[in-house]
């Protein structure tokens, strides 16, 4: 894993501001170690990981978890785990799906929401089903574009 | 030959060959959801039973891999007996932990959960293909204190890093899985047992050199073969500054290790534990805790 940059407190605050602007909340990113790899991918790990360890570990494949990708237009495409973290406190850009649409979403299809909370057209939107945040999508005019990575989709069969 | 060997190990071998596992087991991922909440959610759709030996484990009857909760990483489908080795480590939140042969990550993610994302866990595996599964599972579990590395575990000590706790869940012949896969009997061969034993000794040697003084290694396999279990412990105790510590688990039937096998008498076997498949209707497991003095 090639770390491009370990974010300073100021840079973390900038990310936090982007989240606040998009979802109306702060998630306390300063409590974590945040770093970036190529293609502006944002990663998050516990503060207890001391990055000096990498002077010893040359064959490092991954650190912490993938949080999301910073886009040029100052938006963040969140991973499922990123969406779950942000979703706990988010107050806008949320799409609420019914049971049927949520299942379609988990299979990887575009969906139609039951309700949208302060959604911005053509922006990333958190997907909520009942009490769970199940991922992100892009809010289009009449539907939500699915952004679940293939590896996380439920491939076959009925969801129970 | 496999059956003959088992009959020499235990008196009730017939029960082992007849045993079948009907329920699947899951471990709640408390990094994402509480035990109580997942229990309430699942019992609406499944028959859910508590696991007597681990509060975060449940037995579930049904197709548990196709639920919203599984998709979200609220639980991990994990063999019931394989939840025990991380418990034997008696982890502290701030420990530096090495999981030498980590993929696919069931135990690494369990340890991250026990440590509540504090401390640091190096989850290592030699196989690039298996690293993908490990990465996927760590991401899905939301384990923030894990670093995934790709070393040959036999040479990990060359990194110069030292740890408080090491989990060596060693590659093995997997004969303890007989309860799920009867073909293990047909495919069993002694050369493979000997090769694994040879490899496991190299791995425990590497673990020794990666350990801080007074640190703990938990050695485990899902093999029933004494050559892969007690013989490896005997080798470790006789060649390195290790002492075997007794492990106590409540709620599960365990037996001590095999002290005598053929002409060999194994040191430390009396403090190691064996979980026989037919005793609890789980996979078989061998677990031993060693402290470096």
Image: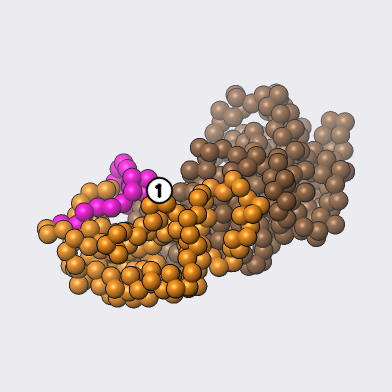
**Colour of chain B in the image:** brown
- Which of these two is toward me, B146 or B47? B146
Corner quadrant of residue B68: bottom left
Question: Is B140 one of the magenta-colored residues?
Answer: no
Question: In front: A3, or B288?
Answer: A3
Q: Is residue A115 above or below residue B215?
A: below
Colour given to chain A in the rendered image: orange
Q: Quadrant of the N terminus of chain B?
A: top right
For the residue carrying disc 1, how many other residues have a C-alpha within 10 Å: few (<14), some (14-19), or many (20+)? Answer: some
Residues in magenta, as a range: A143-160
- Identify which residue, A37 or B34, lies in the foreground: A37
Which secondary structure lies at badge 1?
Answer: loop
User: Whole-percent x and y of residue A76?
Assistant: 32, 62
Q: Decide if residue B191 is on the left or right side of residue A117.
A: right
Which chain is home to disc 1?
B
In the rendered picture of this protein, how many numbered marks are placed on residues?
A: 1
Magenta portion: prevailing SS class: loop
Whether residue A119 is visible here, answered yes or no, is yes
Q: Which residue is mark 1?
A: B65
Point out the residue furthest to the left here: A142
With A83 as the anchor, is A62 left or right in this view?
A: right
Where is residue B192? Give x, y as percent. Answer: 68, 27
């Amino acid at each position: 894993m090639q770390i491009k940059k370990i974010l300073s407190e100021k840079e973390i605050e900038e990310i936090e501001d982007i989240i606040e602007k998009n979802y109306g909340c702060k998630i306390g990113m300063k409590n974590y170690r945040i770093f970036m790899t190529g293609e502006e991918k944002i990663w998050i790990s516990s503060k207890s990981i001391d990055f000096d360890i990498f002077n010893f570990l040359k064959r490092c494949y991954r650190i912490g978890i993938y949080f999301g990708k910073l886009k040029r237009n100052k938006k963040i495409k969140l991973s499922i785990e990123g969406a779950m973290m942000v979703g706990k406190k988010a107050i806008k850009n949320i799409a609420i799906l019914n049971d049927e649409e949520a299942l379609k979403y988990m299979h990887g299809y575009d969906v139609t929401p039951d309700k949208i909370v302060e959604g911005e057209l053509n922006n990333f939107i958190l997907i909520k089903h009942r009490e769970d945040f199940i991922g992100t999508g892009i809010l289009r005019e009449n539907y939500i574009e699915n952004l679940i990575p293939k590896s996380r989709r439920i491939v076959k069969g009925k969801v129970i | 030959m496999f059956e003959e060997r088992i009959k020499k190990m235990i008196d009730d071998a017939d029960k082992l060959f007849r045993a079948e596992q009907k329920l699947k087991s899951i471990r709640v991922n408390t990094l994402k959801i509480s035990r109580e909440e997942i229990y309430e959610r699942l019992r609406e759709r499944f028959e859910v039973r508590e696991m007597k030996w681990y509060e975060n484990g449940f037995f579930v009857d049904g197709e548990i891999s196709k639920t919203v909760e599984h998709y979200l990483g609220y639980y991990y489908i994990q063999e019931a007996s394989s939840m025990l080795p991380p418990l034997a480590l008696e982890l502290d939140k701030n420990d530096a932990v090495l999981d030498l042969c980590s993929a696919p990550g069931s135990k690494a993610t369990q340890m991250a959960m026990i440590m509540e994302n504090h401390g640091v866990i190096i989850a290592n595996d030699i196989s690039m293909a298996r690293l993908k599964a490990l990465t996927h599972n760590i991401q899905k579990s939301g384990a923030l204190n894990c670093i995934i590395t790709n070393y040959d575990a036999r040479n990990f000590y060359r990194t110069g890093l030292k740890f408080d706790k090491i989990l060596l869940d060693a590659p093995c012949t997997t004969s303890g899985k007989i309860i799920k896969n009867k073909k293990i009997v047909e495919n069993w061969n002694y050369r493979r047992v000997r090769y694994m034993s040879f490899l496991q000794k190299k791995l425990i040697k590497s673990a020794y050199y990666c350990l801080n003084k007074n640190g703990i290694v938990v050695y485990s396999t899902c093999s029933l073969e004494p050559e892969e279990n007690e013989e490896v412990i005997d080798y470790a105790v006789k060649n390195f500054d290790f002492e075997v510590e007794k492990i106590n688990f409540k709620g599960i039937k365990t037996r001590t290790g095999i002290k005598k096998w053929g002409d060999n008498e194994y040191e430390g076997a009396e403090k190691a534990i064996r979980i026989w498949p037919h005793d609890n209707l789980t996979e078989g497991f061998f677990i031993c805790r060693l402290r470096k003095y």
